[in-house]
């Protein structure tokens, strides 16, 4: 693991996680499990939950910063600061961070809806900022993260950000105006699949399977289907066509889904998801203006 860490762009980089929720933990787990970053170079802080910081320290050997002096020191000395707080707390946190932030520190945000423009307005100046949208599958190293960069981010900064999120899955660099779409596709995407799985399990039980059997069959089916798309490189539509015999059982099921508007429901749900992400961003920007 030492060799892995030393060869990683993050090997000798000090990283501070501002926020200690599930997404922060997912990234920390990926960084430490893969050796992409050294635990003793990762500091975690939050508003007031010292017990949560101790939990992360125990699980991943990262450094907790619970007191105000420790927080200020961590923010001032880290090379990379990862914003992982709730959207409603973002404006206040950035205003507090402003006096601690050096011009060469890379700021990475995983806060839904928080735009680069709003962050720079709160900081009062342009800054190297990476806006990201990971998802919860990052917890098991199978995440999908969209990234956008401010104009001040250097090539080295890009490399650091990409290395961080490639440690927990795959990455895609997109224009910032598409980050709400990334939220709709992959940020919230796992929940859509879980919802579909819930329905499949419930239907299996209703038709007579035990809950355990229905769950096992559903989990393996979804896992296998995703892996088929991944390994073969074929379009989902083509793989679906191959298993849908005319007038067969699958055809009957798909025809029913089409008749009930399955595709339209998914599209409208994702449109609403993207719109909600934009609303969150507008709320943060509005709060920022009030505080400036």
Image (tube, rainbow, N blue to C red):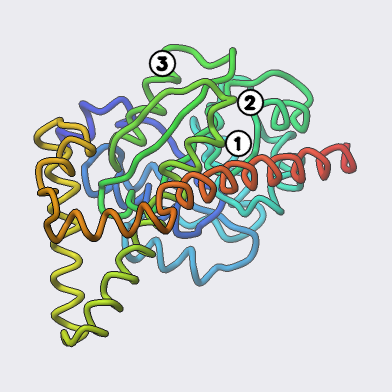
Q: Pointer 1: residues within 10 angstroms few (<14), some, or many (20+)?
A: some
Relative to 68, residue 278 above or below: above
Which residue bears the numbered disc 2?
A: 102
In terms of secondary structure, where does tag 3 sit? helix
Which residue bears the numbered disc 1?
A: 76
Give the residue furthest to the front.
247
Position of the N terminus, as image quadrant, is top left
Q: Is residue 244 left or right of residue 286?
A: left
The percent coordinates of residue 31 (x first, y second) are 30, 43
Q: CA distance from mark 2 to mark 1?
A: 7 Å
Give the numbered dot on residue 156.
3
Position of the C terminus, as image quadrant, is top right
> Is the residue under label 1 in contact with that under label 3 (CB below 8 Å)?
no
Counting every numbered tag in the picture gives 3
The percent coordinates of residue 100 (x first, y second) are 68, 35
- Which mark sits nearer the N-terminus, 2 or 3? 2
Q: Residue at x 40, y 62 (%)?
A: 56
User: Along the line of sight, which residue is nearer the eye, 49 or 238?
Assistant: 238
Q: Pointer 3: residues within 10 angstroms few (<14), some, or many (20+)?
A: few
């Amino acid at each position: 693991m030492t060799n892995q860490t030393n060869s990683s762009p993050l090997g000798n980089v000090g990283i501070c996680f501002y926020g200690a929720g599930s997404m922060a933990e997912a990234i920390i787990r990926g960084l430490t499990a893969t050796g992409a970053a050294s635990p003793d170079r990762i500091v975690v802080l939050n508003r007031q939950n010292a017990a949560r910081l101790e939990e992360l320290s125990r699980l991943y050997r990262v450094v907790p910063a619970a007191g105000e002096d420790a927080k200020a020191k961590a923010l001032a000395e880290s090379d990379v600061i990862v914003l992982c707080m709730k959207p409603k707390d973002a404006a206040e946190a950035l205003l507090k961070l402003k006096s601690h932030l050096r011009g060469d520190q890379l700021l990475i945000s995983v806060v839904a809806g928080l735009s680069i423009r709003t962050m720079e307005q709160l900081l009062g100046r342009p800054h190297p900022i990476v806006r990201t949208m990971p998802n919860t599958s990052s917890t098991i190293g199978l995440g999908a993260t969209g990234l956008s960069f401010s104009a001040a981010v250097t090539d080295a900064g890009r490399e650091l950000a990409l290395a961080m999120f490639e440690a927990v899955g795959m990455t895609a660099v997109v224009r910032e105006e598409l980050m709400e779409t990334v939220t709709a596709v992959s940020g919230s995407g796992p929940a859509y699949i879980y919802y579909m799985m819930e329905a499949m399990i419930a239907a299996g039980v209703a038709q007579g399977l035990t809950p355990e059997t229905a769950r096992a069959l559903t989990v393996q089916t979804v896992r296998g289907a995703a892996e088929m798309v991944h390994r073969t490189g074929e379009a989902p539509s083509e793989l679906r066509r191959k298993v849908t015999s005319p007038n067969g059982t699958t055809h009957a099921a798909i025809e029913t889904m089409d008749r009930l508007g399955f595709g339209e429901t998914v599209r409208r749900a994702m449109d609403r998801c993207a719109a909600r992400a934009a609303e969150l961003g507008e709320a943060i920007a509005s709060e920022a203006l009030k505080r400036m």
